[in-house]
Amino acid sequence: MAITAIKGFNDILPSESGRWQHIEQAARSVFERNGFSEIRVPIMEKTELFCRSIGDATDIVEKEMYSFIDKGENAITLRPEGTAGVMRAFIEHKLYAQDPVAKLYYLGPMFRYERPQKGRYRQFHQIGAEITGVHDPLADAQVLNMLVQFFRDIGLDEPQLQVNSLGCPDCRPAYRTTLMAFLEQRADALCEDCRRRMTTNPLRALDCKVPGCIAATAGAPSMLDNLCTGCSDHFASVRQYLDTTATPYSINPRMVRGLDYYTRTTFEMVTGLLGSQSAVAAGGRYDGLISQLGGPAIPGIGFAMGVERVALLLGDKDFARQPDLFIATLGAGERGFAFRLLHDLLQLGLRVEMDYEGKSLKSQMRRADRLGARYSVVIGENEVSSGRAHFKRMADGEQVEVMLIAEHIKQTL
RNA sequence: GUGGCCAUGGUGAAGCGGUUAACACUUACGACUGUGACUCGUACAUACGAGGGUUCAAUCCCCUCUGGCCACCCCA
């Protein structure tokens, strides 16, 4: 048996890479319009970075990290998400010293040791963006608008924006206690998982899909009703800004995130088309993260989207690029001439293909057709000696005679 | 980590305990000796995930393994 790829690691084949490029370009375009710059950070970091940022008790850290010890006996982890590494670099290079506001984006592979299924892989790809240094809800609103704009740009209007506020270290602990008390009263109506969550992570119970739990928690106290004044005002402003720009969203008070560093605003772009993988993009504010990682007390907010999931939503749209011209040759004698012509046209920026192996004219024409070439031209002895050739428009078969000079050809096509 | 389903060529797939493993697409060549798309012809699985077992006989039955998909958990 030939060697195969590792479970959960996929090849992006030529038939798909066009769609990926389309997504990446659309993202770069919106980000750059919004003043974001790309940052490229390593795909591995010291394990401790993720423990400290994502949270020791999260599923990601507890059971999903690709961790190992390298030859120098360092504890290394393949990054399970992007924000931690970006913030580590931000602090390490003191980017805050150059500009109080940093707007960064990144894209690349992430790794999580999970059982693969639709829209979930062990190596997957995220495109993310972060703003640091802005407390104002304006930053939240801009990030959200940028995300919504991205989905519009690539032609997906199905994913819906949901927002929530998780409060801050001032108000969340009290809410947590309140919620825990509420859950304890109904413990026997809850599923096994939720009974366990009750003490470890009561917020999760609100996100449970078991019907019994949904019913039992229907009247649960909401974080939104328990925000401190600061958080409450912040959330109100975010909503106001979103309204100002007529950005559609809904509030989901039960939205919970899987990373510990989130504070205040959290959000998801949600779709119903990917089975249980409903989140195509998600993020939130992380005001405590940078200081937690040893940096100054600078706030941040950002999101990441799953490229595989976006690609799945885009479906089978064809993003292949077609050649402008296919050059067919009759005999070996003309191939040098054709190659020269090909070269000249490529220099002028046209997409041109020719036959490499002396196939029959019929084969060459078939190939021109299959590649979707806009034009084809046959080069034989006559063309070489006359310096003129018939260019055939493949769509309707119309032919025009053009001098075999690159500039002329470019203008005619 | 747990559960369900599945495993036939480059692809989508039929098939059945017993000597041609359908059909379609793709690809190659040709009918059309200097012009594609339609049509037609020809070619393309010593082979039915791997290893065992049952049987006179297994792609088809049983077991194990491996892989894939989907779901749970959780998440992008």
Image (spheres, rainbow, N blue to C red):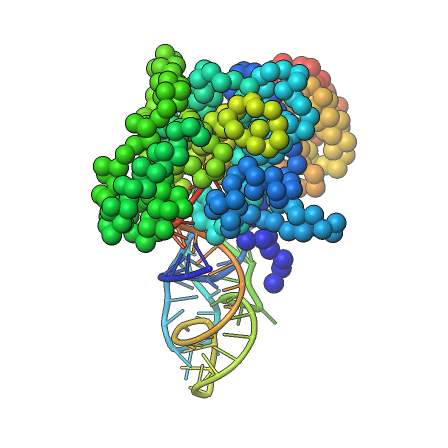
Q: Residue at x 67, y 23 (%)?
A: A94
- Judge from the rendering whether residue A250 lies leftward or rightward of residue A402; answer left or right: left
Looking at the rendering, in which quadrant would you find the C terminus of chain A? top right
Q: Quadrant of residue A363?
A: top right
Residue A211, given in percent of the width and then of the height, sits at: 25, 47
- Judge from the rendering whether residue A227 lies leftward or rightward of residue A338; answer left or right: left
| Vertical placement of residue A152 versus A257, above or below | above
Q: Quadrant of residue A251?
A: top left
Q: Residue at x 49, y 34 (%)?
A: A261
Residue A397, given in percent of the width and then of the height, sits at: 52, 26
Looking at the rendering, in which quadrant would you find the N terminus of chain A? bottom right
Is residue A65 in sight in this rendering? yes
Q: Residue at x 31, y 45 (%)?
A: A209
Q: Nearer the viewer, residue A15 or A147?
A: A147
Residue A45, given in percent of the width and then of the height, sits at: 64, 40
Q: Nearer the viewer, residue A231 or B58?
A: A231
Is residue A44 in sight in this rendering? no
